[in-house]
Amino acid sequence: MSDAYREQHKKRLSYMPWLYRNLNFKGKVWASRWQQEIQQSLGFLETIEFGEDCFIAPEANLFAERGRDIIVGDEAQIAADCFLHGPLTIGANVSINHGVSMDGGNQGISIGDNTRIATGCKIFAFNHGVAADQLIREQPVTSKGISIGQDVWIGANVCIADGVTIGDKAVIGMGSVVTKDVPAGVTVGGNPAQPLNDNSRI
């Protein structure tokens, strides 16, 4: 494999990290070494703990100062152009696609095993006050935390507000704004997100 092709393939994997699982033996050898270097470097610079056989795109931005740890479960995948700021706990086999932004505030974000988060989602576990007699930049910041269950599908460009809990096997439709809890197994969509008539998995 030429150096140019390998660099292009690294970029391909960064934006489509599910392809990492499909590499043949020869490809997995160089890609595993590449991933070990990325994860060791991040672990040295930030308070991040990686499980086994994770994929982290080099273009992803992970920030985890002390007290805002990031824990990444086995075989989790984080694609290019993501912004992740702890505290954040990512379960095993979670997939976070490109362009996702998450900030754990003070109380953190937890994501259960086997959950999929599509491109462009925004998940922020903090909020600002909006008192009329005070400048926005001087408003108090609050944080309740966000909990996302196992085997959840979050469609592209979804926004999730602080304090929300999403139950296991829920589905959040593309472009939804989630401001209230979503029960397990329920499909929601819209702004603000509401249960759809057919609550079966889509």
Image (tube, rainbow, N blue to C red):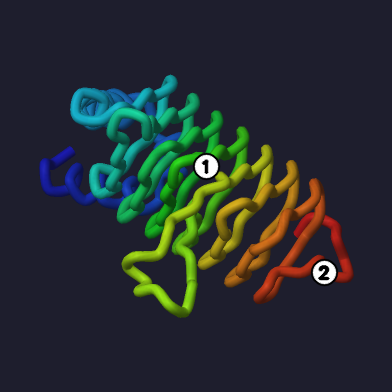
Q: Which mark is residue 196?
A: 2
For the N terminus, which image quadrant? top left
The residue at the point 61 percent across, 33 percent down is 113
The residue at the point 74 percent across, 45 percent down is 167
Q: Amino acid at mark 2?
A: Leu
- 152 sits left or right of 19 in the view: right
Q: Which residue is mark 1?
A: 109
- 115 sits left or right of 62 in the view: right
The residue at the point 56 percent across, 45 percent down is 145
- Residue positioned most to the left: 3
Q: Is residue 171 above or below residue 93?
A: below
Q: Is residue 196 above or below residue 125?
A: below
Q: Which mark is residue 85?
A: none
- 148 sits left or right of 102 in the view: right
- 178 sits left or right of 118 in the view: right
Give the quarter of the image for residue 6: top left
Tell me if mark 1 has few (under 14), some (14-19) or many (20+) residues whose alpha carbon lies within 10 angstroms of its own. Answer: many
Tell me if mark 2 has few (under 14), some (14-19) or many (20+) residues whose alpha carbon lies within 10 angstroms of its own. Answer: few
- Residue positioned most to the top: 52
Q: Amino acid at mark 1?
A: Ile
